[in-house]
């Protein structure tokens, strides 16, 4: 079994899919945002506010470099992980990169209730999300080995699709 790396925009279901897939495939579950929060003893919004986005992005790259590779894992990445060329290369070296996508409307409805997303602060609207997806899509595509759309699918259906494509 290869390691699985989940990428994609905020609200595409990376954490939910990771929860289920880690059990189905008996993989160690790792989440980059959680690791950063624990290391920094701050939540994501506080890290952005106190240390800045660049600092957060550097933490993300560090995590990819320092991962414990002794047990197979499923890694769910923050939505900006694929933006850096270095991260895309590191993720490919780690395993199969799976890009979860969703329509902007689906994403909006999923992120609206969670204020822990500094990238969307003050911009929790459809056109902002659409534009940001357009800007980022090429990076997700470039990083990914497998692409899965999640709209209208249950988490079990998404996991089955991933397993078939692995
Ligand atoms: C970000 C996505 C977030 C988190 C941070 C930045 C982004 O993760 O890493 O707020 O730039 O898209 P989720 O995709 O898990 O929300």
Image (cartoon, helix red, strand yellow):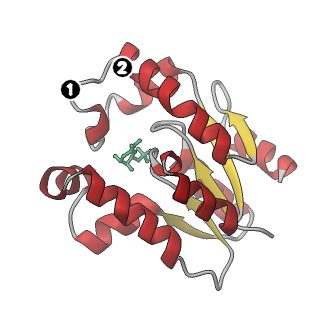
Front residue of 21/85: it is 85
Residue at image coords 17%, 58% = 51
- Quarter of the picture containing the C terminus is bottom right
Q: Secondary structure at mark 1?
A: loop
Residue 60 in picture, x, y percent from top left: 41, 62
**Res. 33 image quadrant:** bottom left
Marked residue nearer the N-terminal end (2 or 1):
1
The residue most toward the front is 85
Q: Is residue 22 above or below residue 68?
A: above
Residue 55 in picture, x, y percent from top left: 27, 60
Front residue of 129/113: it is 129
- Residue 27 left/right relative to 35: right
**Res. 137 image quadrant:** top right
User: Could you give the CA–CA distance between mark 2 and mark 1, rounded to whole angstroms?
Assistant: 10 Å
Q: Is residue 58 above or below residue 166?
A: below
Q: Is residue 116 above or below residue 76?
A: above
- Check disc 2: other Cα within 10 Å, few if <14, some if 14-19, many if 20+: some
Residue 20 in picture, x, y percent from top left: 63, 55
Marker disc for residue 122:
1
Label 2 CB, ligand 1: below 8 Å?
Answer: no
Residue at image coords 74%, 65% = 25
Front residue of 22/120: it is 120
Residue at image coords 45%, 51% = 78
- Residue 93 left/right relative to 18: right
Marker disc for residue 128:
2
- Residue 4 left/right relative to 80: right
Residue 41 in picture, x, y percent from top left: 22, 70
């Amino acid at each position: 079994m290869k390691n699985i790396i989940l990428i994609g925009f905020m609200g595409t279901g990376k954490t939910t899919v990771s929860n289920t897939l880690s059990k189905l495939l008996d993989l160690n579950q790792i989440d980059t945002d959680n690791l950063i929060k624990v290391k920094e003893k701050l939540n994501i919004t506080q890290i952005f506010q106190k240390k800045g986005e660049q600092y957060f992005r550097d933490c993300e790259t560090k995590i990819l470099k320092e991962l414990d590779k002794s047990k197979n894992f499923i890694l769910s990445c923050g939505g900006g992980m694929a933006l850096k060329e270095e991260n895309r290369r590191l993720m490919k070296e780690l395993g199969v990169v799976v890009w979860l996508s969703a329509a902007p409307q689906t994403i909006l409805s999923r992120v609206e209730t969670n204020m822990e997303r500094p990238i969307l602060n003050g911009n929790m609207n459809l056109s902002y999300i659409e534009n940001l997806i357009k800007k980022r899509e090429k990076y997700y595509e470039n990083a990914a080995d497998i692409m899965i759309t999640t709209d209208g699918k249950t988490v079990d259906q998404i996991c089955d699709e991933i397993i078939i494509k692995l």
